[in-house]
Amino acid sequence: MRLITLLPLLLAAGLAPASGHAASASNGSNPGYVALEPLVVNLAEGRRMRFMQVKMQLMAKDPKVQEAIELHMPAVRDRLIMLFAHQDATTLRSPEGREALRQEALLAVQTVVSEVTVSTSLLPAVEGLYFTDFVIQ
């Protein structure tokens, strides 16, 4: 009961927790992160099929960019799934292979965001892509 009466006060004071995936700063100078749902793709390794599960976070300082990422998340996920599905499991076992994939994925996300947004002021919209979990089985 006390929480219900305190919630309007917290909202008015701007102290209530924010909803959604984006953690953004109000002035746009601090980075905000947008978490992607885990992606699972099949990888070929010779005659064996492998699975890769990846969790990622995208970094963008502009809250409008974070909103654009969330709004166009299906397009972002599609582009990443298509990119990841064409990878070689052996290459991704090395740190260099994972770093190359991270750079390709960042470029792919930047491309998607620039394609789906009208304003070019969002470029470079997404400033970073970070793997928070990376498993190949």
Image (cartoon, grey):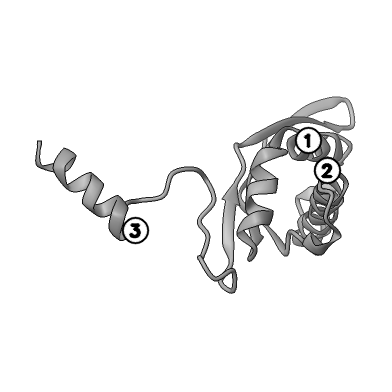
Q: How many marks?
A: 3
Q: Residues within 10 Å of mark 1 (few under 14, many from 20)?
A: some
The answer for how far apart the CA atoms under marks 2 and 1 are is 9 Å
Q: Position of residue 64 (x, y in %)?
A: 65, 55
Label 2 sits on residue: 116
Using the image as rendered, state which of residue 18 and residue 35 is in the foreground.
18
**Which of the marked residues, 1 or 3, is nearer the chain's N terminus?**
3
The answer for how far apart the CA atoms under marks 2 and 3 are is 31 Å
Spot the residue most to the bottom.
Answer: 29
Label 3 sits on residue: 14
**Which of the marked residues, 2 or 3, is nearer the chain's N terminus?**
3
Label 1 sits on residue: 75
Q: Are marks 2 and 1 in contact (CB under 8 Å)?
A: yes
Question: Horizontally, is 44 left or right of 36 in the view?
Answer: right
Disc 3 marks a residue whose amino acid type is: Gly
Disc 2 marks a residue whose amino acid type is: Val
Q: Residue at x 59, y 50 (%)?
A: 34
Disc 1 marks a residue whose amino acid type is: Ala
Q: Residue at x 51, y 65 (%)?
A: 25
Question: Horizontally, is 111 left or right of 8 in the view?
Answer: right
Q: Position of residue 54 (x, y in %)?
A: 66, 42
Q: Position of residue 80 (x, y in %)?
A: 79, 40
**Placement of the C terminus among the 4 image quadrants:** top right
Q: Residue at x 54, y 71 (%)?
A: 27
> Image quadrant of residue 4?
top left
